[in-house]
């Protein structure tokens, strides 16, 4: 059958108030870029007429301004999951303007197939090549596209002509069987290919094809500073020590790395450290740093869900795409983040924290316990199942007014049972084999900023009066947070009111 080309406005007209809408891509990479803008415009027009219009948005991960930005500003999102990273959608979630529920990235595809969230009414899928028989080549990110292609009642194709060179061969589209018929996912090393290079979509479901020539609009991360560089050095020195002492295989292990300046600093540090051998990655995103490490010969291979390259780096990638064809494989999020594979491959998982407490619990998502930042993303998928789970962050923020090391985290995303190592620019706290009191001593002395160490020890002394396996004082455990709310400075916390 012949699939018609239609405008973005025509495509948006097929989406109704209350529809469950699934989007291709993972981060900004591979996400729709023109239909969602038209959808936001339609929502605004309907709102001006007094008519309700919101859609429920299911994505691979965060998106871009074309999606979360436009739709949030149009107040057009009813339900949102799993991860968002845009300032406008963050504001919408924090004021209760949308029902945002945060869940592990590896869970969303299977939860949709299980029927937990209802049907997918419309899927908007970006492709870079297509054929009349319903075979499509995706772009720079997969997310949960293979599942959406199967589940969606209707599909809108965004055909991107931005990429001047073919992505054919970079994708490994695979959907596991659901229980009770699920088998092992047969990945035994990062480069194992188990699926198809194409996504198949029933042409009868496709509403139309919308042309697009938009880039991913990803800006490069700001240059690292002294703090991020020291964090990177600390992580790399620790990993080198693990190799020297035989606590890690001499062949090294595949790397998983989160997103941001700290993650980039760690990756560049791995590249510069002569004790770290050439390595592979099994991760959810690769950034500009990975491309550099591949060209330098330090990173041999990367399995990922998305190429989260800045626009300039993406152009460089496309100009040199043949060099990378045997070095990169993109998979759906439930495969790139699969706990089964994380455990089997024995990953070194490196993620960032907003704050950590003195017992090793980590908050990745909520500022002061209530304001959502972005979401848990894939950090839980990797942390709980990794060979070694490392969380890093600067020891202080806002010129020292906030300590990232606190008596008790204001929100728990990763418990002490999963967090093995904490790293700040101050040093490394190896928490393996330590009881709560030993963890507290290690974290305070090695990771807390010197300005906060005495204050944290004051809390420990106060909490010790209550005894118990994990010494806590439930009146005083949030004193630092409360001081910041009241005065704008955690250093002004006063334990005297609690009997210290």
Image (cartoon, grey):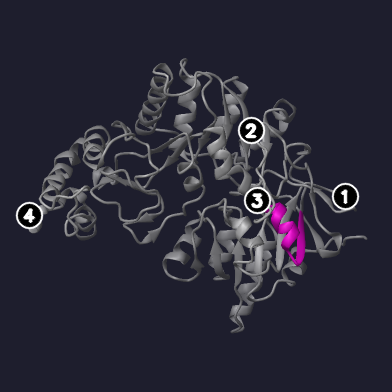
Q: In 3D space, how far apart are the residues under numbered discs 3 and 4 (Cα atoms)? A: 52 Å
The CA span between labels 4 and 1 is 72 Å
Nearer to the camera, 85 or 205: 205
Crowd rating for badge 1 (residues with CA inside 10 Å; few <14, some 14–19, many 20+):
few
Q: Nearer the viewer, mark 1 or mark 2?
A: 2
| Secondary element at tag 1 | loop
Residue identifier under label 2? 188
Residue occupied by mark 3: 25
The residue that appears at 41% across and 16% down in the rendered structure is 244
Residue 287 can be seen in this image: no
Task: State which region is magenta.
Answer: 143-158
Where does label 1 land, which residue? 131
Residue 53's place in the image compared with 235, above or below, is below
Mark found first going from the N terminus, 3 or 1 = 3
Asked if 31 appears above or below 260 in the picture, the reply is below
Disc 4 vs disc 2: which is toward the camera?
Answer: 2
Give the residue pinned by disc 4.
Answer: 496
Of the numbered discs 3 and 4, the one sitting upstream in the chain is 3
């Amino acid at each position: 059958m012949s699939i018609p080309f239609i405008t973005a406005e025509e495509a948006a007209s097929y989406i109704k108030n209350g529809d469950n809408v699934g989007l291709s891509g993972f981060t900004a990479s591979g996400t729709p870029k023109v239909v969602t803008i038209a959808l936001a415009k339609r929502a605004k027009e309907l709102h001006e007429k007094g008519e309700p219009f919101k859609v429920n948005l299911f994505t691979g991960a965060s998106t871009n301004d074309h999606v979360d930005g436009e739709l949030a500003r149009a107040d057009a999102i009813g339900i949102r999951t799993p991860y968002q990273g845009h300032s406008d959608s963050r504001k919408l979630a924090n004021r209760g303007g949308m029902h945002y529920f945060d869940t592990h990235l590896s869970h969303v595809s299977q939860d949709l197939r299980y029927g937990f969230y209802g049907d997918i009414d419309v899927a908007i899928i970006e492709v870079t090549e297509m054929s009349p028989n319903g075979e499509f080549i995706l772009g720079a990110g997969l997310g949960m596209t293979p599942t959406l292609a199967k589940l969606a009642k209707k599909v809108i194709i965004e055909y991107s002509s931005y990429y001047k060179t073919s992505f054919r061969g970079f994708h490994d589209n695979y959907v596991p069987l659901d229980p009770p018929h699920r088998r092992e996912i047969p990945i035994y090393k990062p480069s194992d290919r188990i699926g198809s290079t194409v996504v198949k979509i029933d042409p009868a479901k496709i509403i139309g094809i919308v042309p697009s020539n938009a880039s991913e609009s990803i800006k490069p991360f700001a240059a690292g500073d002294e703090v991020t560089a020291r964090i990177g050095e600390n992580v790399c020195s620790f990993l080198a020590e693990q190799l020297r002492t035989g606590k890690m295989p001499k062949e090294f292990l595949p790397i998983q790395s989160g997103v941001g300046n700290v993650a980039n600093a760690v990756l560049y540090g791995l590249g510069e450290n002569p004790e770290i051998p050439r390595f592979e990655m099994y991760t959810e995103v690769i950034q500009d740093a990975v491309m550099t490490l591949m060209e330098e010969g330090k990173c041999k291979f990367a399995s990922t869900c998305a190429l989260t390259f800045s626009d300039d780096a993406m152009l460089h990638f496309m100009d040199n795409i043949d060099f990378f064809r045997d070095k990169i494989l993109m998979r759906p999020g439930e495969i790139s983040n699969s706990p089964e594979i994380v455990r089997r491959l024995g990953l070194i998982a490196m993620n960032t924290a907003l704050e950590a407490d003195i017992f090793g619990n980590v908050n990745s998502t909520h500022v002061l316990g209530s304001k959502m930042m972005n979401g848990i993303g894939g950090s839980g998928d990797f942390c709980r199942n990794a060979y070694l789970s490392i969380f890093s962050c600067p020891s202080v923020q806002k010129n020292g007014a906030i300590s990232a090391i606190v008596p008790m985290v204001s929100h728990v995303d990763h418990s002490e049972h999963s967090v093995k190592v904490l790293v700040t620019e101050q040093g490394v706290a190896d928490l393996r084999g330590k009881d709560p009191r030993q963890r507290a001593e290690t974290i305070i002395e090695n990771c807390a900023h010197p300005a906060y160490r005495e204050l944290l020890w004051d809390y420990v002394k106060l909490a010790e009066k209550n005894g118990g396996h994990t010494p806590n004082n439930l009146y005083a455990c949030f004193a630092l947070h409360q001081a910041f709310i009241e005065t704008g400075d955690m250093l002004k916390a006063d334990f005297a009111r609690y009997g210290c």
